Amino acid sequence: MKSRRNAMSNGPSQRQLRVGEQARHALAQVLQRDELQEPALDGVVVSISEVRMSPDLKIATAYISPIGGDKDIIVAALNRHARFLRGRAAAYLKQLKYMPEFRFRIDTSFDNFAKIDRLLRSPEVTRDLRHVDDEGTEE
């Protein structure tokens, strides 16, 4: 008989999701306070869309969408200052036994959504949808 953990290991656990959301809020608070003295982040707004936790909750991968500035430079700057951000976020994550190591990545989900939206609005798809509406059934 399979264990319950193996049967349900398709995605993150509830605890991973909860801690990830807490880490996202903590990072947002730290970045909002503008304590990080980094020229690459001057005048840049960083949106943290998601934080994914490793199963042991020791690594937190933050997916960001910077508004303004070069994305690669901003991610490199955040990764350079990950230990500083970790220390500042500790005040907001006191309930954790171990403070996770932060890693920053560009969030490409919005690019994927835009690509799918462009495909759905393409003339070929519009034509096919119109044909289905006119006929009332699919062929």
Image: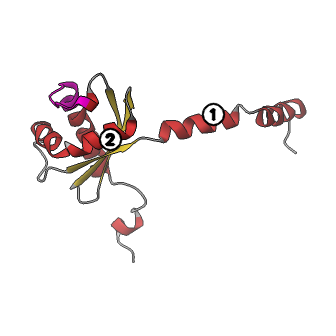
Inter-mark Cα distance, 1 to 2:
27 Å
| Residue at the (13%, 53%) spot, across then down | 98
Residue 75 got which mark?
2
Task: Identify the residue position indicated by label 1 in the image.
Answer: 117
| Residue at the (32%, 30%) spot, across then down | 46
Q: Quadrant of residue 106?
A: top left
Per the image, label 2 sits on a secondary structure element best described as helix
Give the position of the C terminus as an image quadrant. top right
**10 Å crowding of disc 2: few (<14), some (14-19), many (20+):** many
**Where is residue 74 drawn, in percent x and y?**
32, 36
Answer above or below: position of 70 versus 17.
above
Q: Nearer the viewer, residue 67 or 11?
A: 67
**Where is residue 75 drawn, in percent x and y?**
32, 41
**10 Å crowding of disc 1: few (<14), some (14-19), many (20+):** few
**Where is residue 57 drawn, in percent x and y?**
23, 55
Q: Nearer the viewer, residue 88 or 66?
A: 66
The magenta stretch spans which residues?
29-39
